[in-house]
Amino acid sequence: MKLWYGGKIYTLTAEDAWVESVVTEGGRIKAVGDTQDLFETYKDGIKKEIDLKGAVMYPGFTDSHLHILGHGERLMRLDLSFMKSAEEVKQALQLHAEQLPEGEWIIGDGWNENQWEEKRIIHKDELDEISRNHPMMLTRVCRHALLANTKAMELAKVTDRTPDPQGGVVVKDESGRVTGYFHDKAQDLIKSAMPEVTPEYLRKAADLAVKDMHAFGLVGGHSEDLNYYGGFKRTYDAFLDVIDGKTTKFRAHLLVHHGVIEQVDESGLGFKQGTDFVELGALKIFSDGALGGRTAWLKQPYADDPDNYGVAIHTQEELDTLVGEARKRNMPVAVHAIGDGAVEAVADAVARNPLKTGERDRIIHAQILSSELIHKLQHLNVVLDIQPTFVASDFPWVMERLGNMRLKNSYSWKTLLDAGIKCAGGSDAPIEEINPLLGIRAAVDRRASYDHEVYQAEEKLSVYEAVCLYTKGSAEAIHKEGEQGMIQPGFTADFTVLDRDLFTLKSHELADAKVMMTVIDEDIVYQRS
């Protein structure tokens, strides 16, 4: 047994509920209460005492939606996310190209024209000026669009005559020439031409990601990676190799993209099977794109593009069929849906194919809603995976996309919670920063990183509500609220320990807290030196 004491320990069983100490055994919480009482009760069994030295303990933070391998790749690749202009991106690419062997792919992540003074899309001709020998793939911050140069398109056999695939757009200019800009499913044309990743590459990406998440206080994450790296088995095996439960612990809940579900069947695995630390989750489906590239599926056209309603990745019939495939396997679904058109289609598909196992379906993002849609969601057994940092990164440019009338029920986290709709908090890393404290701050402060203005102040959450998104909310998303997300007997001994009390800080100070310790299965996996 271990005794954890010497700091304030928030249980989250209720707002302001805290205790002095916790006793753990076998990876579970055995008891909580006053230090002296617990010591007297369990003194014969306590083998180790951990002094928090005035730090503050919370239930372990879990990111309800991210891409673990993608985050690892971001740590390995050219990071374009902090660059403030197209010229800065091009300069970075030029320097990078000069260091690479002839013919090697230039891969960059995270560019975001909405952060640039001149909000334009870099043309393939500009990329060709940097290099005609290195194929180039530059993923936009939303991961729903990429840029490619001519060399990459030649390898992918993309020409001016290449048609738009279902659920994607190959952007062309007025004369019909490809511009090097690819949306959603069209990205697969370029990605299919890239060299197959090796198992060593995947293990390195997973290892880097997990270590980084430990350092940010994360004990677990719900991730979607299994369809992108050469098949289910190769990717799943990389997770098993890295998160072995001995040298490395992390609670990885892996969504199963519908494109690999038959491979999962062939492996003999199913929903919530795996190991104590790597388990398979819901069937993952994409129903639309993203707001940045105007491919999120809206019921009314974009305010700044009146002929465009976005992209429906699947027809309603196809969506219903995919949900039906999940139900055949007693699986919930987790569907990416940003626009109100997409959320409505998902809600209808779920309502027509109800889940009878007690598990919950998930709608990921759900950024654009209406009063009618919120009412419909109240009557479904769903959890919304929200990303509070989208408020910080999307405003004010998203106002141009949607117009003021639609904003009333957009990014409306407080409205959703008040309506009794369950919500879980995630980062969508590598699209946003992995740090959960940034998400907590964004949910409470609602301040844009671009102009530092507060948007939709009426939708601010309390600190308690925000912290619950990353603890109790993430547990509810996978129907584990009876064993994760709070500090009480019988729950997993997973803790995030910070140097200060979030509940006493001003909203703008929340992300200044430092992680002192990350504990998984009662083992300290990270400790600040």
Image: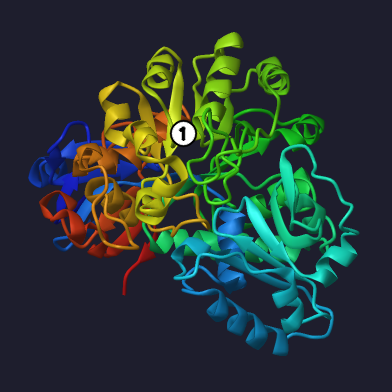
Q: Is residue 522 above or below residue 118?
A: above
Q: Is residue 293 above or below residue 273?
A: below
Location of the C terminus (image quadrant): bottom left
Residue at the spot of label 1: 366
Residue at the spot x=31%, y=52% of the render? 496
Residue at the spot x=82%, y=70% of the render? 150
Tell me residue 299's x, y (percent).
Answer: 53, 27
* 93 with respect to 344 (left or right): right
Q: Is residue 476 above or below residue 174?
A: above
Q: How is the image coloured?
A: rainbow
Q: Is residue 217 visible?
A: yes
In front of the other: 430 or 313 = 313
* Secondary element type, mark 1: loop
Residue that lies at the very extreme toward the front in this rendered image: 175
Residue at the spot x=58%, y=50% of the render? 293
Residue at the spot x=57%, y=23% of the render? 346
In front of the other: 456 or 67 = 456
Q: Amino acid at mark 1?
A: Ala
Tell me residue 409's x, y (percent).
Answer: 35, 31
Tell me residue 217's x, y (percent).
Answer: 36, 57
